[in-house]
Image: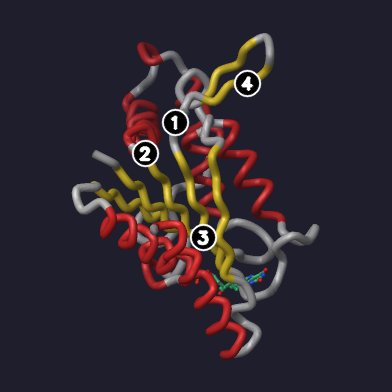
Amino acid sequence: MTTLLQINASINNGNGQSSQLARQFVAALQKREPEASVVVRDVAAAEPVPHLDAARFGAFITPAEQRDAAQHSVVAYSDTLIDELKCADVIVLGLPMYNFGVPSQLKAYFDHIARAGVTFKYTEHGPVGLLTGKKAYVFAARGGLYAGTPLDTQTHYVRDFLRFVGITEVEFIYAEGLALGPQSKETNLARAAAEIARLAA
Ligand SMILES: Cc1cc2nc3c(=O)[nH]c(=O)nc-3n(C[C@H](O)[C@H](O)[C@H](O)COP(=O)(O)O)c2cc1C
């Protein structure tokens, strides 16, 4: 049975355009495979991921038997996020653009799932990702138009990060121009919906 993990990163809860597109895609996949199970992780609104600081990172790198109670709880939280990824066959990420970058809470989420020896390991040939055998779809919602230009700071970054932890099959679907007037919004959301239908067919 397929497990789908939908990650929402919009500050607008499930109502963000990126979350709505991610949800539409998950629903389309579920229609194709009704037994598929779905887990939703909201990293920015419902349960914001705290930013990484020295104490949290310190917990990650402290050997398990030496961790105090607070450190155990930090690692348990990170483990929960990682277990969701490990269990997922398909990851569907709603990715808003805020101030030319990814939401800071998504960065915080990435900071909590990048764990040496758990999601990647260092080898003599460089780092190797351990979350293999998954496919990711990224629904990027933007007010302006950036795809394919140097101003698109998100695509390379998200693709590189996912590759670092072993998720190499990544497809981006863009809903851009959402703040360029009602016509642009409508056209671009319709284009994204058509992509969803094509990908889930
Ligand atoms: C705080 C904030 C900053 C934004 N910054 C940008 C930006 O730098 N570039 C852009 O194209 N759109 C920007 N937008 C527009 C969003 O990308 C757009 O509203 C998108 O739908 C956000 O995704 P969401 O609806 O899933 O939250 C910004 C929106 C907000 C609320």
Real-space CA distance between mark 3 and mark 1, rounded to the nearest whole angstrom: 20 Å
Label 2 residue SS: loop
| Residue 148 in the figure: left or right of residue 158 | right
86 relative to 180, above or below? above
Label 4 residue SS: strand
Mark 4 or mark 3: which is in front? 3
Contact between marks 2 and 4 (CB within 8 A): the answer is no
Ligand 1 closer than 8 Å to the CB at disc 2?
A: no
Q: Residue at x 29, y 42 (%)?
A: 3
Of label 2 and label 4, which has the lower sequence position? Answer: 2
Real-space CA distance between mark 4 and mark 3, rounded to the nearest whole angstrom: 27 Å
Q: Residue at x 48, y 33 (%)?
A: 56
The residue beneath circle 3 is: 139
Tag 2: amino acid: Asp
Crowdedness near tag 2: few (<14), some (14–19) or many (≥20) residues, C-alpha within 10 Å:
some
Mark 2 or mark 4: which is in front? 2
Horizontal and vertical percent position of residue 23: 36, 63
The residue beneath circle 1 is: 133
User: In terms of depth relative to the viewer, which is nearer, 39 or 32?
Assistant: 32
Question: Residue 89 has which mark?
Answer: 2
Real-space CA distance between mark 1 and mark 4, rounded to the nearest whole angstrom: 17 Å
Tag 1: amino acid: Gly
Real-space CA distance between mark 2 and mark 3, rounded to the nearest whole angstrom: 17 Å
Of label 3 and label 1, which has the lower sequence position? Answer: 1
Of label 2 and label 1, which has the lower sequence position? Answer: 2
Q: Residue at x 53, y 84 (%)?
A: 186
Real-space CA distance between mark 2 and mark 1, rounded to the nearest whole angstrom: 7 Å
Of label 4 and label 3, which has the lower sequence position? Answer: 4
Quarter of the figure that contains the C terminus: bottom left
Contact between marks 2 and 1 (CB within 8 A): the answer is yes
